[in-house]
Image (cartoon, rainbow, N blue to C red):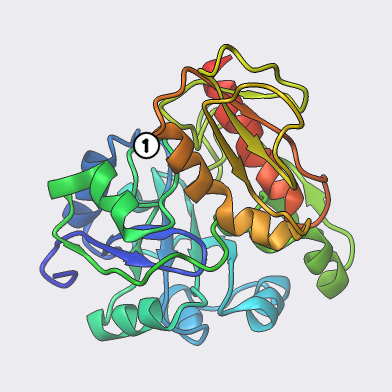
Amino acid sequence: MLRAGGLVAFPTETVYGLGANALDAHAAARIFEAKARPSFDPLISHLADAADLTALVGAVPAAVAALADRFWPGPLTLIVDRPAAIPPIVTSGLETMAVRVPDESAARALIAAAGVPVAAPSANRFGQLSPTRAEHVVAGLGGAVDVVLDGGPTRCGIESTIVDARGDRPVVLRLGALPVEALVEAVGPVDVRLGSSGQPVAPGTLAAHYAPRTPLRLDAAGEPDGGRRGFLAFREPPAAGDWAAVEVLAPDGDLTAAAARLFDALHRLDAAGVTEIVAEPVPDEGVGRAVNDRLRRAAATWH
């Protein structure tokens, strides 16, 4: 299906991706159409193996190669110069491209069998909650996808970290499942430059994004509203109040577990018929920084 120009949704360790042949401009255009994604927001291309990077783009800077060697397969997306084989639609006209090797055996097997790099943003309508289960994909995109591969719930539950390491010092462009602390431990100090106004320089960096259909507010001390609101808690349900629905991310305080459950919990609250979702921030450390980043962007969509 990928070789024929079709769309295949598949699980990665982060979220489900909506894949198309990254060498086929028409196939890539189908991604934008299915997601209702603006043409200025670039896609991430996925490879089956780290060795495929130089075969596709040629030599890369030493820092890029070192990060790929250290963290691939894994939830790290690297910015490289766009090769001629990748049509400009994949990179939204940028002379750079985003690329990674997923840490999910089914995803790598699919890409290897297709024999092409696979462009794959999250398999959801643009700006809405990312899918962490196959049923999220079906509910959100339905017949716009030719094939949905069901690999069960994704392990990380939050998107990859995006890094541009082509310059003197690596720059984190999007927080994600690979914590900044792990990058610093591997390569030393990094800069963090998040958000985007105008043309994004990397996928998933718009200030308002990752939002449920229900209005969301980031507020640890939210008040219930006659049993009509939902609450997204970090470790424990709110002590008092008549909430219509409550989701707890990590009763044991494990931030990795909180990230893995984030979008699934928001999907459930979104389907509960509540008038508003009040979300409690998590500790702003490790992968918790990425969880709070997603919550802030979701809230920015509504406020």
The correct choice, above or below, for 136 with respect to 66 in the image is above
Q: Report the quarter where the N terminus lies.
A: bottom left
- Which residue is at a point 72% across and 32% down the rendered structure image? 238
- Mark 1, other Cα within 10 Å: few <14 / some 14–19 / many ≥20: many
Quarter where residue 80 is shown: bottom right
- Which residue is at a point 83% across and 62% down the rendered structure image? 181
The image shows residue 258 at horizontal and vertical percentages of 66, 54
- Which residue is at a point 70% across and 81% down the rendered structure image? 70
Residue topped by disc 1: 126
Quarter where residue 219 is shown: top right
Which of these two is toward me, 114 or 216?
Answer: 216
Callout 1 amino acid: Phe
Which of these two is toward me, 207 or 300?
Answer: 300
Which of these two is toward me, 89 or 263?
Answer: 263
The correct choice, above or below, for 264 with respect to 56 in the image is above
The image shows residue 288 at horizontal and vertical percentages of 75, 50
Q: Report the quarter where the C terminus lies.
A: top right
The image shows residue 110 at horizontal and vertical percentages of 30, 79
The image shows residue 3 at horizontal and vertical percentages of 16, 73
